[in-house]
Amino acid sequence: MIRAAKPEDAAQVVPLLLQAMGDLAYKLTHSQNEAAVKHIFEQLFKQPANQYSYENTLVFEEADKILGSLTAYDGEKLIELRIPFLAIINEANPAGNAPDAETQGGEFYLDSISVNPAAQGKGIGKQLVKAGITWGQQLGHQHIGLLVEQHNERALKLYQHLGFIIQNEKEFMGGLYQYMVFKVK
C-alpha cells in the first residue's frame, strides 16, 4: 500500500533515500562519514518544509515494512525547500558550496525513487512513480520531471515505459544525467 510518509518512518526511509542518491548524498553534504550523512538526512526527513521532509515523501508499505519510497516536490519551491538543508550542511561544513539546482519552476520533480533490494522486480518502483505522477497532477502540474543516471538502463526503460521522454542531458554535481519529463494530458 502506498501512503504519505510520517516522521517516525525515518529509520526505514532514510536508508532508501541514501540508496537512491548514492554518491550524491556525500557530495551534497560535503562529508564522507556515512553515519554523519545518515544523521543529516534523518534530521531533514523528520522536519517539515524541506526537500527531504516526510511531507514530500510517499512510501510503499507491506506488513508494517517500508519497501520503497518516493520523494517529490514542486520545482518552483526548490530554493525555499533547500534552506533548511543548506543550514544543516553549513553548520556541519562551513566551507561547503551550495549544490546546483536539479529542477525548475513549472514542474513537479521526482527527486528520489528507491526500492529495497530484496523487494525489487515486483513493480513497487513503477507503482511509486505512478503515484508521484498522480500526486503532481493533483497539485495542478502539467510536467513531471526527474533525473536519471545516464547508464542506469533499467530505470531509463521503466520511465520511458511510463511515458517519460528524454528532454536533454544535464550535468549535476559532477555527474551526467538524462533529464526526463512526463507531460500530463
Image (tube, rainbow, N blue to C red):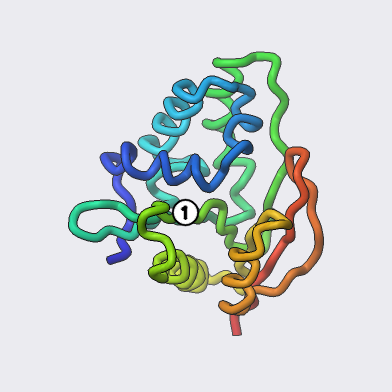
- The N terminus is located in which quarter? bottom left
Query: What residue would you read off at disc 1?
Result: 114
**Quick check: 182 left or right of 58?**
right
Picture quadrant of residue 183: bottom right
Q: Is residue 179 visible?
A: yes
Residue for point 56% across, 58% down: 110
Q: Nearer the viewer, residue 16 or 10?
A: 16
Within 10 Å of disc 1 (Cα), the crowding (few <14, some 14-19, many 20+) is many
170 above or below 101?
Answer: below
**Quick check: 9 left or right of 79?**
left
- The amino acid beneath tag 1 is Ser
Looking at the rendered structure, the secondary structure element under dot 1 is strand
- The C terminus is located in which quarter? bottom right
Where residue 112 sits in the image (x, y, percent)? Answer: 53, 52
Residue for point 47% across, 70% down: 126
Residue for point 33% across, 51% down: 5
Residue extending farthest to the left is 63
Picture quadrant of residue 46: top left
Where residue 172 sits in the image (x, y, percent)? Answer: 74, 44
Q: Is residue 139 visible?
A: no
Where residue 117 sits in the image (x, y, percent)? Answer: 42, 53
47 above or below 151?
Answer: above
